[in-house]
Amino acid sequence: MIDFSKIPSPCYVLEERLLRRNLEILRRVQDESGVNIICALKGYSMFSSFDMIRQYLKGATASSLNEAKLCFEEMKSEAHLCAPAYLDHEFDELMRLCSHITFNSISQWEKFKNRIKNNSKKISCAIRINPEYSEIGTDLYNPAIPGSRLGVTADKFSDKLPEGIEGLHFHVLCENDSYTLERTLKVIEEKFGHLIKQCKWINFGGGHLITREDYNVEHLIKILKDFRARNNNIEVILEPGEAVGWRTGYLVSTIQDIIENKGIKVAILDISISTHMPDCLEMPYKPNIVGAANEVPEKQAYRMGGISCLAGDYVGDYSFDKPLQVGDKIIFEDMIHYTMVKTTTFNGVGLPSIGIWTEQDEFKLLRQFGYEDYKNRLS
Ligand SMILES: Cc1ncc(COP(=O)(O)O)c(C=O)c1O
């Protein structure tokens, strides 16, 4: 059991045991279905845990030069790359760091294909497709909305894949289950089936929340096996980020003040919702807090306020068993994915430290941040 009194505030803390649990599930999917799973660095980049991740997953997917470098240096493997556009001056380095490159448009492929062909190292290339089908409810996260800039629609292809292209890539899921994937695959095979038959590999993107308690892993394994069997045993790649870091750790914070306005009590914390857990405002969603419940009428409710001056920098409301006091710790759950990779220093707010609660039940402080981290991004 994690002992939160040993953790400084504010701090993101990964619970190693929980990460291993997720990785065991992902390994089972790979072993039983024959697909390859790689980690999407945009969602999970806690590189001090890559030694463990490497034991289970087949590398990582990058969406920028920085992520490709991190994959190469810390995951110790060449990256799979997928981004809306590549920059001329970065492309040679990208080719050095990557084994697979997915192009978001036919024009991007046309622009770079000779550099790929003349490169001394073999790089396997794909086109990102847009099936114009997605069950994602939030437009901000939906790559299949009309007018989307992500992926090539079926009407833009001829009967043959462009020469030199070996794969296809789609990403139209977000926190979805295997039944959504099944329906999505049906649309994709209807629209792109003839192209899939010409491919060596297909990447099913991310958004598969395989490690959530209610995810039907057996069903996933079945549909992956069936898909491969229907398509010449094609190599299938999944690149989840959230499923890797799902419920693997916390953001530990401390109450600095409690104020009241029109009967609403607000705890002011040493973290910011806006800068340290931005998805809570963007999605939006209300994160769980250890020991707290949703507001109930018989108990005093508290809103959790951030330390930035953004008026909307708060989440709530929560009820606790006893009244809160200045100095109490507030522990937000599930704060490892899409948090550290998205933090900002808006308002000059400091970044939380990063640590690990190890499988040996010890706390390891990995990083602390200071003024230089804020100043280095300005001039
Ligand atoms: C192309 C691509 N692959 C993978 C992912 C990872 O998705 P998730 O973290 O939801 O599994 C994303 C997320 O936006 C993405 O855009």
Image (cartoon, rainbow, N blue to C red):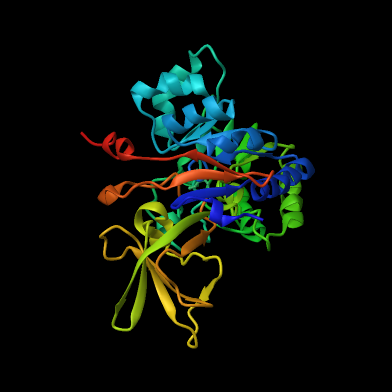
Q: Residue at x 43, y 57 (%)?
A: 279
Which residue, as the protein is rendered here, is positioned at the far bottom? 298
Residue 226: percent from left, percent from top: 75, 48
Q: Nearer the viewer, residue 358 or 203?
A: 358
Q: Nearer the viewer, residue 9 or 90?
A: 9
Residue 355: percent from left, percent from top: 53, 44
Q: Taking 232 as reference, is 149 above or below it?
A: below
Q: Residue at x 35, y 52 (%)?
A: 275
Q: Taking 33 as reference, is 218 above or below it?
A: below
Quadrant (top left, top right, bottom left, bottom right) of the C terminus: top left
Q: Nearer the viewer, residue 351 or 181?
A: 351
Q: How many marks?
A: 0
Q: Nearer the viewer, residue 230 or 115?
A: 115
On screen, residue 32 versus residue 209, left or right, reads: right
**Is residue 163 in view from this perspective?**
no
Q: Quadrant of residue 47?
A: top right
Quadrant (top left, top right, bottom left, bottom right) of the N terminus: bottom right
